[in-house]
Image: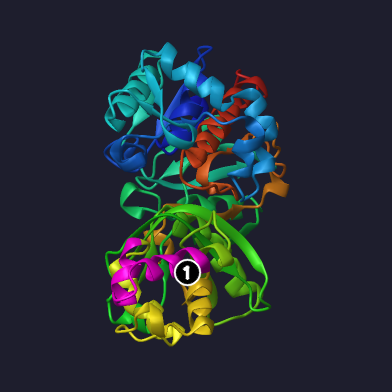
Amino acid sequence: MKYDVIVIGGGSAGLMASIAASKHGARVLLLDKGEKLGRKLGISGGGRCNVTNNKDIDELIKHIPGNGRFLHSSFANFSNKDIISFFENLGIRLKEEDNGRMFPVTDKAKTVVDTLVGQIRKQGVEIKLNSPVDTILYEDDRVLGVRLKSGETLICHAVIVASGGKSVPQTGSTGDGYHWAEKAGHTITELFPTEVPLTSNEPFIASKELQGLSLRDVALSVWNPKGKKIIEHTGDMIFTHFGLSGPIALRCSQFVVKALKQFNAGNIEVAVDLFPEKSVDEVYSESLKLAELEPKKAVKNILKAIMPEKLIPIMLRKSGLTDTLTFDNIPRQDWMRLAKLMKHFPIRVYGTLSIEDAFVTGGGINLKEVDPRTMESKLVNGLYFCGEILDIHGYTGGYNITAAFSTGYTAGLNAILNQPRSY
């Protein structure tokens, strides 16, 4: 069987690539090894599907710290604004939530998946489910077609690899595409987990005394062994039985992974700032004033007004203060130590959960070997890559899916524009 374009992978990038490639009547085949399309898309955004982010392009790219600048050309083809228009033109009304996140008003990812699948069917895309690919066939530095694990050979002018990374493998993302890319001569940069919880064996983590504690509107920073701050994010986090999770812990994870490797360190310090908008001196004076207003009351009870109760015993211990202390007996030096701890509560983390537990895969196909204007391989004619298989990764909040839709659209469009359609 002969096709103009074969798309491998029915996730965000693959669905959009199929739509872009088939919009002008090309013969397109979409292959997926699973029994359902859009599996990862269907669980994204907590099952609500955060389809994109409405920030300006420059801000959008800042939120894709893993090679976001590579996407400038792709965004020129199909930006976040285009994604919004695309879905609204298909009848999916969107709403904007905090930090520019865009969701369907139905709050159901199924709405997005069903609409995309319906559109590719409407545009005549042939779909083969439960059809795992064995290999991509190459001849004389160009794509020849693909061979399925069933033994069936499919001939085409262009192959778009949208098979994903290695994160969330239950959705089918098991890293199959890396081998096909290497066969074509491509380099795979080291894979690592991003947007993933942090692990720690600090005593207060091991004892589980902070397990389940959520902190809102705090800052979490990552520090290298030389005492230099690498990154800081503000928002919410949670203590778990193994370490730290929540939005800002996930955002810091890639920097922890990179610092551990760069400095060949067994652990890296992260620090919680309970009052990001205040200075140490302000925290010191304001907390001391609270104690002064109720001089007979134990400070452990006074502190409940400004910090979670679970944290208080640990903070007092680390500051050298007793829990029966009252205002009249407060050692000012130790109270300053407490104020500094509230601004910089250090936690040693030794890594993250596995790449399979991550939301996003870091690393992937070396971008120096991919044309950013078309997503075509620079090594093999007719071979295109899009989505998470590329060495691109962003924060959660609609940034990764924006990159997937944009690179998918760009690959699909150029797979048709740049290839002859006669055999």
In the image shown, does 305 or 268 lie closer to the viewer?
Answer: 305
- What residue is drawn where x is 54% and y is 50%? 180
- Residue position for label 1: 342
The N terminus, quarter of image: top left
Q: Is residue 414 visible?
A: yes
Residue 108, quarter of picture:
top left
Query: Label 1: how many residues lie within 10 Å, few (<14), some (14-19) or many (20+)?
Result: many
On the image, the x and y values in percent for residue 379 come to 71, 45
Q: For the stretch drawn in magenta, what is the main secondary structure? A: helix
On the image, the x and y values in percent for residue 71 come to 65, 37
Along the horizontal axis of the image, is 202 left or right of 367?
left
In the image shown, does 115 or 79 lie closer to the viewer?
Answer: 79
- Is residue 297 rendered magenta in the image? yes
Query: Which stretch appears magenta?
Result: 284-305
Here the colouring is rainbow
Q: Is residue 1 visible?
A: no
